[in-house]
Amino acid sequence: MSSIQLVVFRLGEEEYGIEIGFAQEIIRIPDQITKMPDMPSYIEGLIDLRGKVIPIIDLKKRFGFEQTERSVDNRLLILDLETMLLGIIVDDVSEVIKIENEAIEKLSAEISSLGSNSLQGIARIDERLILVLNALQLKTEVFQK
Amino acid sequence: MITLAGKESCKILAEFLANLIPGGVVFALVEGDTFVWVKASDSFTIETIKIGNKLQDDTTTMQAIREKKVLIQNIPRTVYGKRVSMVSIPVINDNGDAVGAFSIALPKLHPVAAAFGDFAPILAEMFPEGSFIYMSDLTKIAYEQPSKKFDMPSISVGYELSEADIAYQVIKSKQPMMAEVDASKYGVPLAVANYPLFDEDNGEVVATLGIVTPKKTAVTLRKMSHTLENSLSGIAAAIQQLAASATEIYSNEEALNSNIKEITNISEEINEVSAFIKEIADETKILGLNAAIEAARAGDSGRGFGVVAEEIRKLSDQSKSTVPKIKQLTDTIKRKVDEASGKSNRSLDASQSQAAASEEITASIEEITSMSEELSNIAKSL
């Protein structure tokens, strides 16, 4: 039985998971984020992380959440998406968990066709439902106009 | 003057009159220098006037016989032991020689003494606690009148005055005197007023009139007002103590209030510390997560590191979970402290009103004290 490890974070009340292999690190939201002109509102700007320029997106905005206040618990999750690094602003990163592949239910094609196809499936752990994101799909979605 | 023939008529008349004259009388017939016939009233006699006794040359009677005229003389107390008015009428024989005399001795009484029996019984009853009225001559008690409520059994007619007696002092000083006698002498406290009585003719002191009234009520009143004063001063002292402790309570409460404020500040400091703990826990958590990510990226070789990462994360969870607990505790502290502060403020108010009340009581007591002093003065003047 193969298993995967998920980095679990929250967006609003919901918990999301992303495969740990795509995560590079978690940091606090830096004080300085360089804004870029003429960009979609979910693009926060750019930061410099140890010499690397990384674009930052507000994932909640991108997912169409109503904007919530930023708090001290907000974190920046830096993703390593093969060709690039991407920072996503999330409401708190809660844990790293290991789950069996079987515990992830695929969404039916009808439902995934309605919305974002970056949603890979739903992991059920006890009473919790964790929306598992496909990191590469997320990259494609974020950078398509 | 009386003739020898007339003397028999005089004797008959005297027999009738003897007991009719108020105050009494002694009639006597003298032949030569000897009493030959004597008639005294029941209430008044003179020892030396009796049949067979001879008269001295200097007596009124002998003088009247010598001078052959009627003589009226006041005889001082030294002669017969009492004051007497002597009337001597010479008896003349047929030759016009004085051979004897008819003498009438009347007790000489001061008008007050004469009226004593009339006024004293009435007056004696006129005092609320009764009274004892007496008259003395120059040496002893001559009349006494007790009342229903009060008597002085140790003082009776014939009692010899001594230097300690007020009547004695009045006779000496010729001045009215008022004095108080404490209960040690007669069993009850007394007020004694004594007035000298003077002879109508020569102005000499001849007697005294005294009124003794018991002063039980006044003395009781005085004792009560004294007791009242004592207890009042006791109360005043107690209240002073009370006021002092109210002041102490007040300052204690003030100190308590400032202590409470300090506690509030300390619990705020604790909150700051706990915020710092939260920050560290957050940091540790990020550290743990990053370590887990790093371990996962290292693959199999990172497995051991992954365990450490997990432990770090658990540690951070644990530290973070203390934060709300601390918050809960500091909130409880704050609430309790607020309660304590409220209570202490209330007792501060209470101690203030206590101080005010004790001031009021002190004022009232001062008023009562001055009233009791007044009462004491009144009692002294009764």
Image (spheres, coloured by chain):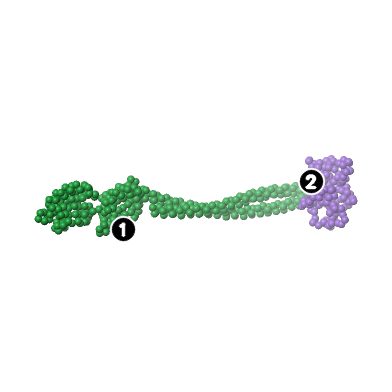
Chain colours: A purple, B green
Q: In the visual, does B240 lie left or right of B4?
A: right
Q: Nearer the viewer, residue B369 or B56?
A: B56
Q: Which amino acid, by three-letter code, is at mark 2?
A: Glu
Of the 4 image quadrants, the one containing the N terminus of chain B is bottom left
Label 1 sits on a secondary structure element that is loop
* In-image side of B123 versus B333 (left or right): left
Could you tell me residue B109's position as x and y percent? 25, 53
Q: Is residue B325 visible?
A: yes
Look at 32% across and 57% down and name the residue there. Answer: B176
At label 1, which amino acid type do we have?
Gln
Mark linked to residue B175? 1
Mark 1–mark 2 distance (CA, rounded to whole Å)? 119 Å
- List the single residue furthest toward the left: B95
Nearer-the-camera pick, B274 or A13: A13
Residue ID for mark 2: A13
Among all residues in the image, which is located at the extreme right?
Answer: A145
- The crowding category of the residue bearing disc 1, from other C-alpha atoms within 10 Å (few below 14, some 14 to 19, many at least 20), is some
Kindly tell me whether residue A52 is visible in this rendering.
Answer: no
Task: Single out the mark in the foreground, 1 or 2.
Answer: 1
Q: Residue at x 88, y 47 (%)?
A: A137
Residue at image position (87%, 54%) is A39
Q: Nearer the viewer, residue B194 or B75?
A: B75
> The residue tagged with tag 2: helix, strand or loop?
loop
